[in-house]
Image (cartoon, helix red, strand yellow):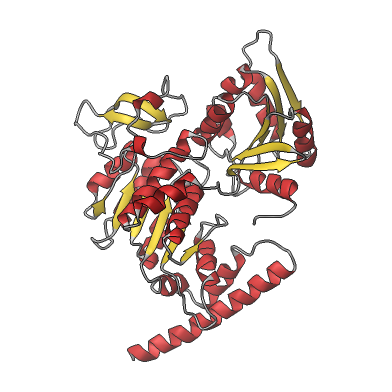
Amino acid sequence: MGNKIQLIDRLRLGFAVSVAKSVTFIVKSLRLGAASVLPGSIARRIEPRLLELLSQQVKNGVILIAGTNGKTTTALLLCTILERQGYRIAHNSTGANLENGLMTALIENTSLLGTLNVDYAILEVDENIVPRVLKPLQPRIILCLNLFRDQLDRYGEVDSISKRWTKVISTLPLETVVIPNADDPTLSYLGQQLPQKVSFFGMNEPEHYLEAIPHAVDSIYCPSCGHSLDYQGVYLSHLGDFICPQCGFSKSQPTLESSEWSQILVGLYNKYNTLAAVTAAQELGVDEAIIRDAVNSFQAAFGRAEDLVINHKRVRILLSKNPVGTNETIRVVTESSDTTTLLVLNDRTPDGTDVSWIWDVDTEKLVQRGGTLVVSGDRVYDMALRLRYSENGSQSNLNLIVEEDLRQAIATALKHTPDNETLHILPTYSAMLEVREVLTGRKIL
């Protein structure tokens, strides 16, 4: 009976994959998009166990990457490292990180007979679906990057997410390796509660402390007893060096010495992405020389500190989709000498329909430095109002331009960008895709 079920599963899986590949061919041939979600959605209807049946065929195991910020960059860097070691990788490189996107990524590397021939599957996963996919994926390694407030209309607060993660991860096999962010109190505590092998990553460079804790901070209370944490310093948001004066809970010890690892991408948040990927690569036994070479020559994922040249002018796209991420991209902008910035705010499903988070962003720092700020997007006037409220009432050298039409907004921002400077574009997720389509002439999704 078992062999018969296996044969039926194989036939159904092969049929599901064949249909999905046909859908991919049609969508791409008609230039309707990148076919990063629809093929998986259709295949899943034919074979509901598709994710489980495909992940079982990954030779060396699935690597799951979850968190609010940094998934795409971390996944791409780890993918680059493992490919340089000679491994074949399946990766949802378009950033489609819900179930259908994961299935589509695996299907791309599967034969018409339903055979998946890869060494590793690196899958970035939306933080809210982690509990749903852990059982079918049975990952070898789980990277837990961070937990910030993001799309509260869909997800809720970070503590509810971490509790769901802990409950499900603790049921996985003991040989599963969990790699949490030691600087995030919620994830540091999560790692300390698990029975599996845990390797932490984090910063140990006090010279990078912020001057003060940002007002958009998400979690400065002890996840064990609820008391306020004492911080020696913070690197971004609530990530830092901390201890609870009441119960003694404190930051876990990172596996790596962060100062020994350089980064090529801008922003301290990308240092965390680098440390996460390197910790996972070392856990898999990758040669250190290969890891360092990959890190030092790494190119950003689309829209994540991505640099382009448009009309002979430099453009940098910095995805900005929640308070913490946007505060960090603003820090990148304010630390530069560039004078023109384009902000694009959308409120579509991928962005989260609640845009009230912009009032937790430290836009005052961006406004006070002056220069030209061009604003666009579906919620252009919400962002413009936020920027106006950021002015301190004194004489301002800010040139605020409101432009509803995105293509015109980009043209206006480029016009105001001097030839020797870089135009920084800070878009939400769907806005980032639109910006790239305008700039490069092609869609990502």
Please say if 435 is above or below 360.
below
Question: Looking at this view, is 214 or 280 the one in front?
Answer: 280
Question: Looking at this view, is 158 or 34 the one in front?
Answer: 34
Q: Answer whether residue 420 is visible to the viewer in this image.
A: yes
Residue at the image position 33 percent from the left and 46 percent from the top: 180
Q: Quadrant of residue 141?
A: bottom left
Q: Answer whether residue 164 is visible to the viewer in this image.
A: no
Residue 58 pos. (x, y %) = 40, 70
Q: Residue furthest left?
A: 247
Taking 193 as reference, is 350 left or right? right
Taking 332 as reference, is 166 left or right? left
Question: Looking at this view, is 403 or 255 the one in front?
Answer: 255
Taking 195 as reference, is 143 left or right? right
Residue at the image position 42 percent from the left and 59 percent from the top: 82
Residue 62 pos. (x, y %) = 39, 63
Taking 418 as reference, is 16 left or right? left
Residue 258 pos. (x, y %) = 35, 37
